[in-house]
Image (tube, rainbow, N blue to C red):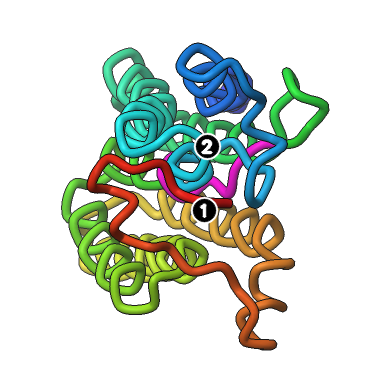
Amino acid sequence: MALLIPLIFLLIGYVSGSVPWGLVVVRLMTGQDIRTVGSGRTGGTNALRAAGPVAFGLVAFLDGAKGFLPVVAAHLLFPDIPLAAAAAGIGAVAGTIWSVFIHFKGGAGGVTNMGVTLGLSPIAAIAAIVLGLTAFIGSKMASVGTLTGSATSLVTLIVLAALGRSPWAYVLYGIAQLVFVVIALRPNIERIRNGTERRIDFSSFSGKKAQP
């Protein structure tokens, strides 16, 4: 029984994370398949390329929510089982990257990780968002921002657990999400090393649709 509840929330998180909001939003706004644009992923950055800043904002919000809501549900229903919230987060990030609804493809999991981390620990979320955005803006590479935010989530959760401010179960989430994100971004990491990674033109946020 002790493991049944976390397993249930792992499944709930996975189903929630699997909803490909980028595909839905871009299809509704433009009629095109986001998977045929840019990186082929379903996250906010590719939604920006496909349909502009409004799509980016909608997808980012929805991708964050699909990580945040299962974690909050686990907190509310089983506050004494922190592993349930951690499992919900693990499932949500896994679902975002390997969605059951689109042949186990998806996004990179960065924004969903921010939503999960916010549900687990606002302090860790603030640190991850600030450093992730700083890295993204400084490098103009979404992958660098995602990796930085993901690593910051793990480090901050470890520090908080060591200080007794957060359950160690959340560190399990931090490790899992970082592994998942690194696996998802392996092609990007290789392009970063080669100096060929895609860069974001921030003028895209002015309202003009970004180019792939």
Location of residue 76 in the rendering, given as x and y in whole percent from the top left corner: 27, 17
**Residue at horizontal 37 percent and vertical 70 percent from the top:** 155
Quick check: marks 2 and 1 in contact, CB under 8 Å?
no
- Apparent side of residue 39 relative to residue 146 in the rendered image (left or right): right
Q: Nearer the viewer, residue 89 or 84?
A: 89
Relative horizontal placement of residue 91, taking residue 36 as reference (left or right): left
Query: Image point 18% across, 47% down: which residue?
Result: 122
Dot 2 or dot 1, earlier in sequence: 2
SS of the residue at dot 2? helix
**Residue 21 location (% of width, % of height):** 51, 23
Q: Which residue is mark 1?
A: 172
State the image quarter where residue 98 is shown.
Answer: top right
Query: What label does residue 50 carry, if any?
Result: 2
**Mark 2: few/some/many CA within 10 Å (<14, 14-19, 20+):** many
Element type where label 1 sits in the image: helix
Label 1 neighbour load within 10 Å: few <14, some 14-19, many 20+: some
Q: Position of residue 66 (x, y in %)?
A: 43, 25
Which span is picked out in magenta?
A: 106-112
